[in-house]
């Protein structure tokens, strides 16, 4: 004992000694009332100063592992540890259907796994090398100096007030009439949608959305037991005739729309269609959840108002916002803008789920936005992403034989292939070191078998070209084999 | 126009000009194709440099609000804003039962409200003036320098790996056999319990817990539609006979236990009862959710093992941990330790709810723990809180006539009054500027009418004495009136 201890640099030595002795006690190797070697002896044995040993002993006594008798030394306390042999629970039998569904729909567990050296087009997360870490640091230091103690204690379920106020102005600046509306801060879009569906739907309700749509949204809808009504997407947004027909056919509880740089197609819904969709849905009294996804990544053209702006003083549109596709997704901050009374209800659900979103993260994000760092960052990365987008588009056109390439911007393109199945293509490309997301994952029905989503935000230009060329080659090979057959 | 703009110091001037012009456009005050005043004119009108105006115009063009024609100047883009008159949705009719329950059980909305000058014993949050903000800052700067970019991008649903590893060792140091077990990071205890109940229960299932127990836990159980089976609490933990009887009577799905500094009673379950409760529940094959609440705030006595440590290699105990009652609750970080297979399921639910907990918060907390700041902080505040606890106990004994005072530590005491109803007492004290939490809030049945919880963590000593004296006076007054009646 005491001779097998090795110290690391990352943690104070006295705490490492404390942990070591605690472990011995908990393992039953130092029994109750046993006398510890004197601090002098321990200091010699461990080759550390006597002060270090004394500090370790103070902490051990604090935590109730040893007691000292004046003039006699330190002794092991009566620490009750009785290992029980216990029956083994088979947790696969204990979980409910909801949990099974969560695992079945968890693509992180079932998708192809990236391996070192592969070129991956699966991600549409921002490129972290573009982040202004120094600005973030500055924002942190400013806020923590101003109100560090307060920020580290409990905050409010609704969110950090200055951030709420900033986002309110920010939404006004998108043309939203915020009278009668309010903001709730959430842990990203994902929590926002979860809270909304928990508040407004029951199992078996129908929800309408674009087909294809955001795969995480499909997962969340399915986990809420909703029946999904998909509306096919045209090049300027959902098919209006189908929208009307579906609404005439059946009762629908809610609509979920992604009007800007729609995931996965990259389509921007035209201003006319935004207005038309809004009017049709209003006629059927179906509230809209508008996902502001990627709205900030507009590369060109004039400002297009979100649907919530078109609704004016109305209260039927619920907007979910997030900067996570461009800025600091690691912070997990999103927001909901909706009718005041509705936000009031949602706040209670938020509180019951996790009390509130990290105050320090909200405060730093606020400072970052307020100081204008965000606009500056956006200006810089928009240029870079736009260039990358144009490059990716050019490479796709040059290398990938296909029916159609969709996407007006954003961090990905969506390709409809001629004949080959996306999953078959993926398998073949995987063996050549290239992976991407098969399109069927974004469909509410069994369509999309011939489509693929190619995310390029974190891929270097030379790898975009190389990866697309490999995909192209694999398709050509497959074709020539097919011809011969 | 342009003469009603006032600038604030907190945001770059060019962005304030951009926001102002955007607002004019969105309000329809600057119509499509209208020419903006030249940058020279604007600089004069706004009394700012021409560079500032030019920068504002660049941002306006970026965002699609103006377009420039070479040699002709800048013009307003075709920004489509059409305010629609819309039918008004009555959201109170759109929400479901779950949401109504969330609001009904939201004590932040229904409790007595603190007003300036009042002495409040309702909070058991830590005293933020004790936080080591400088250490937190240091931990932040270390981590952000090492891996800032990575931390600001998406992380893993399971959690930040170094923190998981630290907490694994931390739990080993509480005597837990971690073989076959794993850790999931959550947004505090509240999210942990929500995920667990979502994974393991169905509406109508029975859950067993101490009576009284943590009010947030009761709220979450009710929101999951569970039937709560309360076990009365004695001075060393739950009544074992009742535990056996209830289990013999009815099927129970899960047990929820708070063995250390139990909220609201402050009772520490004895090692013997921990073992006995574990054995009884195991016999009925009922898994235990152990809330490690306040375990770190041990003021005296030897180390008492959590139940999960007693279960050894068994996998029937699920431990939920959090430092939020002592350290940085604003960060919203907690963890679950349980069987590996179960954690795997829970991870998928976590991912579906909010992808992951803030990486930067996890990383800073890791650094704070690893550097030994936590132990140093704990050592310091334990002494302060202990002194406060002893002072509060002394004051309560001196001033508050009652049947019993419970609580062996922690940040609150629990008082059983003689006759007066806690809600009646609260109303009277409220008028004298003192508030606290009525005990019935913690009960699973209609007991606790005569009990009050007095949290003192954020109350200064002189106010503890003053507040308790007022409570005592109100009781004495009430008594003398009763006698006369």
Image: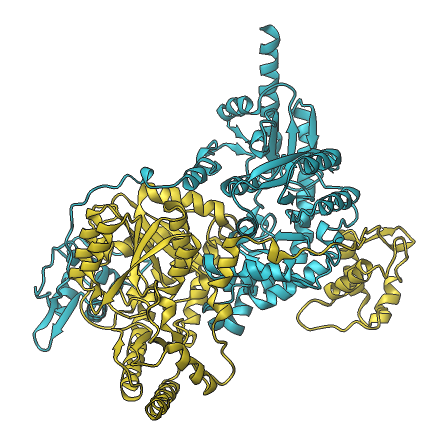
Chain colours: A yellow, B cyan
* Front-most of residues B145 and B452: B452
- Does residue A349 appear left or right of residue B52 in this picture? right
Residue A161: horizontal and vertical position, in percent?
39, 49
Image coordinates for residue A201, horizontal then vertical, percent:
37, 47
Count of labels in the image? 0
Nearest the viewer among A281 and B479 is A281
Residue lying at the far front in this picture: please name it: A485
Quick check: A376 above or below A68? below
Horizontal side of A275 relative to B231 (left or right) equals left
In the image, B77: left or right of A66? left
- Of residues B249 and B454, the one drawn nearer to the viewer in this rendering: B249
For the question of whether residue B349 can be seen, the reply is no
Q: Residue furthest right?
A: A72
Q: In the rendering, at what x and y percent does residue B281 appear?
A: 71, 44
Residue A418 visible in the shown view: yes
Quadrant that contains the C terminus of chain B: top right
Vertical placement of residue A422 versus B170, above or below: below
Residue depicted at 69% across the width and 56% down the height = B315
Residue B460 sits in quarter: top right
Quarter of the image with the N terminus of chain B is bottom left
Q: Position of residue B249 (x, y in %)?
A: 67, 35
Q: Is residue A65 above or below residue B152?
A: above
Residue at 49% x, 63% y is A104
Residue drawn where x is 28% and y is 61% of the image: A210
């Amino acid at each position: 004992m005491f001779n097998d201890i090795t110290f690391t640099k990352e943690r104070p030595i006295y705490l490492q000694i404390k942990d070591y002795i605690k472990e011995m006690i908990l393992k039953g190797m130092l029994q109750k009332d046993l006398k510890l070697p004197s601090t002098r002896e321990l200091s010699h044995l461990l080759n550390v100063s006597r002060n270090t040993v004394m500090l370790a002993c103070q902490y051990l006594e604090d935590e109730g592992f040893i007691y000292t008798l004046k003039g006699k030394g330190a002794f092991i306390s009566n620490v009750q540890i009785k290992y029980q042999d216990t029956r083994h629970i088979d947790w696969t039998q204990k979980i409910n259907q909801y949990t099974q569904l969560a695992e079945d729909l968890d693509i992180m567990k079932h998708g192809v796994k990236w391996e070192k050296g592969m070129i991956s087009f699966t991600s549409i997360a921002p490129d972290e090398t573009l982040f202004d870490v120094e600005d973030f640091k500055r924002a942190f230091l400013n806020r923590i100096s101003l109100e560090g103690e307060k920020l580290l204690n409990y905050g409010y379920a609704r969110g950090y007030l200055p951030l709420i106020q900033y986002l309110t102005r920010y939404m006004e600046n998108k043309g939203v009439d915020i009278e009668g509306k309010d903001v709730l801060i959430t842990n990203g879009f994902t929590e926002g949608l979860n809270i909304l569906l928990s508040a407004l739907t029951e199992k078996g309700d129908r929800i309408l959305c674009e087909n294809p749509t955001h795969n995480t949204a499909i997962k969340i809808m399915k986990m809420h037991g909703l029946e999904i009504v998909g509306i096919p997407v045209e090049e300027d947004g959902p098919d209006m005739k189908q929208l009307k027909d579906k609404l005439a056919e059946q009762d629908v509880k809610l609509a979920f729309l992604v009007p800007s740089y729609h995931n996965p197609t990259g389509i921007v819904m035209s201003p006319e269609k935004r207005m038309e969709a809004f009017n049709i849905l209003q006629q059927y009294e179906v509230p809209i959840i508008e996902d502001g996804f990627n709205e900030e990544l507009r590369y060109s053209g004039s400002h297009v108002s979100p649907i919530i702006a078109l609704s004016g003083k109305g209260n039927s549109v619920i907007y979910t916002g997030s900067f996570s596709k461009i800025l600091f997704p690691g912070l997990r901050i999103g927001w909901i803008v909706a009718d005041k009374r509705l936000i009031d209800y949602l706040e209670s659900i938020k509180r019951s789920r996790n009390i509130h979103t990290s105050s320090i993260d909200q405060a730093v994000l606020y400072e970052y936005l307020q100081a204008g760092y965000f606009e500056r960052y956006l200006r810089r990365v928009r240029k870079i992403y736009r260039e990358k987008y144009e490059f990716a588009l050019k490479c796709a056109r040059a290398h990938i034989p296909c029916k159609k390439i969709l996407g007006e911007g954003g961090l990905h393109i969506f390709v409809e292939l001629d004949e080959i199945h996306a999953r078959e293509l993926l398998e073949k490309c995987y063996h050549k070191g290239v992976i991407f997301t098969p399109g069927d994952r974004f469909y509410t029905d069994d369509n999309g078998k011939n489509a693929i989503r190619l995310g390029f935000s974190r891929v270097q230009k030379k790898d975009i070209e190389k990866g697309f060329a490999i995909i192209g080659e694999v398709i050509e090979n497959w074709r020539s084999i097919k011809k011969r057959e």
